[in-house]
């Protein structure tokens, strides 16, 4: 069975799966797994999910710098040979003092 066929079959079964009780959900999962050949956990995820709904925004920490600063930092990082963060900070302090010795960092 193709991936497209699995998705279409899941869309057809999804409403019945959501409305079913625990025992009936087990039967539906067994039927879906036998028909499509996927593992049970993959079937649970597919039948619980929404049918092509919008994705959530990426989590994590918000950005602190604007695009101009970010472009400058990325250029400096490329010049350093793409050092890791810990080494890059040490390199940056040395590089900035050599570029502008009169500025007190």
Image (cartoon, rainbow, N blue to C red):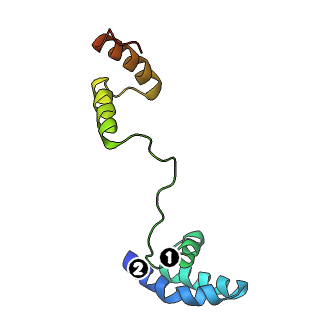
Kindly state the secondary structure of the residue where label 2 is placed. Answer: loop
Q: Are marks 2 and 1 in contact (CB under 8 Å)?
A: yes
Q: Is residue 63 left or right of residue 27?
A: left
Q: Earlier in the sequence, mark 2 or mark 1?
A: 2
Q: Position of residue 72 (x, y in %)?
A: 29, 32
Q: Is residue 99 above or below residue 39?
A: above
Gap between marks 2 and 1 measured at Cα: 8 Å
The residue to which callout 2 is attached is: 1
> Residue 83: x, y in percent?
38, 26
Q: Is residue 17 above or below residue 72?
A: below
**Residue placed at 45% from the left, 75% from the top?**
53
| Label disc, if present, on residue 89 of the rendered structure | none
User: Considering the image in quadrants, where does the N terminus appear?
Assistant: bottom left
Residue 30, image quadrant: bottom right
Dot 1: within a 10 Å radius of its alpha carbon, few (fewer than 14), some, or many (20 or more) residues?
few
**In which quadrant of the rendered view does residue 96 lie?**
top left
Q: Residue 74, how many percent across, how many down?
A: 31, 34
Q: Residue at x 53, y 88 (%)?
A: 13
Which quadrant of the rendered structure holds the C terminus? top left
Q: Secondary structure at mark 1?
A: loop
The residue indicated by pointer 1 is 37
- Nearer to us in this view, 77 or 52: 77
């Amino acid at each position: 069975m193709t991936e497209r066929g699995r998705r279409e079959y899941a869309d057809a079964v999804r409403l019945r799966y959501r409305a079913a009780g625990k025992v009936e959900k087990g039967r539906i999962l067994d039927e879906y797994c036998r028909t499509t050949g996927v593992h049970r956990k993959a079937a649970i995820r597919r039948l619980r999910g929404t049918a092509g709904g919008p994705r959530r925004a990426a989590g994590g920490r918000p950005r602190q710098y604007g695009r101009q600063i970010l472009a400058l930092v990325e250029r400096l990082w490329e010049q350093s040979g793409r050092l890791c963060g810990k080494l890059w900070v040490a390199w940056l302090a040395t590089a900035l003092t050599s570029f502008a010795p009169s500025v007190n960092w």
